[in-house]
Image: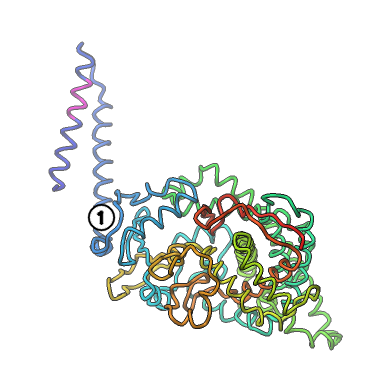
Amino acid sequence: MKSGELIKGILYLVKLMNLSVAMDHPLPIEEDPRNGIRSYLTICLIMVFFIWYAHFLWKRRYLYIHSWKVEGPFSFPLIGCGYLFLGNGTDIIKTLVKIQQKVSSGLTRIWLGPKLIYLISEPKHLEIILNHPKALEKENVYKFIAEAIGQGLLTAPAKKWKQHRKVLAPSFNQKVLDSFVEIFAKHSITFVEKLKDVVGQKNIDLYPLASRCTLGNICQTAMGVNINVQKEGREFGVLLERVMEVINHRIFKVWAHLDFIWHFSPLKASSEKYLKKLYAFSGSLVSKKLAEHNRKLELEKSFLDAEIEEEPYKRLAFLDLILMNSQFTETELDDEVKVFMAAGTETTASSICCLFTLLGMHPDVQQRVYEEVIDILGHDRIVIASDLPKLKYTERVIKENLRIFPIAAVFARSLEEDIDIGDALLPAGSSAAFITLFIHRNPKYWRDPLKFDPDRFLPEEVAKRHPCTYIPFSYGPRNCIGWKYAIANMKTIIATVIRQFKIYTEYKSVEEIEINLYLLMRMRDGPKVWLENR
């Protein structure tokens, strides 16, 4: 429709409205001149809106032209496919999976409000995008994560990420990771002691216990600060869960993208309360570390640190590297601490809960893990670094757990230039999203995908698959810096726990387990496990 015809139509509607008013008042009344002014103001506002919207569409015509070439669900103006994401976290992840299941090409598109997002599942497409130098920026919705926990490695712009990653990478080399195993083992033993209190209880609340264990590990290893995590860390997991719920709401509810609407949302006040407590906890860690760092500097100045110089590799964690590097500002230091605490605690704790559930469902697998651990460690010896490479079956079990239950169930990148993936051209200004849960359970790449089979990760089986069929820690240059840390941590925890307890669960199959998206993935109804002493 031409703009002139549109304006005529609007004027005609206004006349009809005026006529209707006149018919409601058959007796002559004195005409209020303000009514005419209001009518013309209304017309002007409508015209301004349509002119703005037409200009908005015209500037983005390149995106619309390319989006028409890829199939996807129906999109409304302004809100796009936002109407599909009105439910809770369980509904959202189901919707994302269903959208991808409807196409065979592994490529579909959605509009999340005015944002064009391509959902990618074909491994060859993933490899191109995740290795592309112009696809290193995180999708714009990550700003909601950054607003909550800061611009650490997870959320930082590509330029800052490159600088920080280069500085922090040495804190995750193998020699440093090996020095952490002693700490992992110590907190795993404490975890076992806490589990003894709930032996025999059905459907134990496992996540808080696992969260305190992983929080203790991340604080003492990456932060280099030892805290009484069973006391001081008891609320951290709960607070983090509430914050993630809020972030998830902002990402998938398109109206919450608008700051002026979010400002009046009751969720905003709740999130600020949670964040205040989280910041207080992370701030206390930084304060302790700074005090320790300053004491060390004073000792060095006094030439009293002859013994300290023998230890740096053992405790040169990521926070030590930040304090030694002058390019980090105080804000950047604080942001990295918050991101590492959140990511290092939540991801591993959630994975442990899923792993317990799968072991409870598969007593034969559980028995093989137990036998391997006993064969290498015996019944009582503490785990040491040299044990971990020998736990080969246990590692396959952990990897299969991360395939069925990828904790980072969804992640996305912003495309800074056109990227040709062979079957389509993804335009600059759009985004690529990866539904890891769908990719990891896609029967196109995984035979009987919901079957728990650790032998999928035998070397000869791995060699048959494209590497991008399995991306629990992302892929390419911006993958998770702490993936080796996570595997070592989980190996140590499970090797310590499995020698003490038999694990059971009420679930009979993976199909029964509903997934919830709290930004990261969680089991909606919990692991439903219980323990018995061996």
Q: Is residue 331 visible?
A: no
Three-letter residue code for mark 1: His
Horizontal placement of 186 versus 75: left or right?
right
Q: Nearer the viewer, residue 332 or 520?
A: 520
Q: Residue 208: x percent and y percent? A: 69, 55
Q: Residue 362: x percent and y percent? A: 60, 63
Q: Residue at x 76, y 69 (%)?
A: 225
- Residues shaded magenta: 15-21
Horizontal placement of 394 versus 94: left or right?
right
Query: In the image, is residue 436 part of the stretch drawn in magenta?
Result: no
Q: Residue 170: x percent and y percent? A: 63, 83
* Direction front: furthest residue: 364
- Which is the main secondary structure of the residues drawn in magenta? helix
Q: Which residue is mark 1?
A: 55
Asked where in the image residue 349 lies, by quadrant, the reply is bottom right
Q: Is residue 216 visible?
A: yes
**Above or below 423: residue 205:** above
Disc 1 is placed on an element classified as: helix
**Above or below 469: residue 501:** above
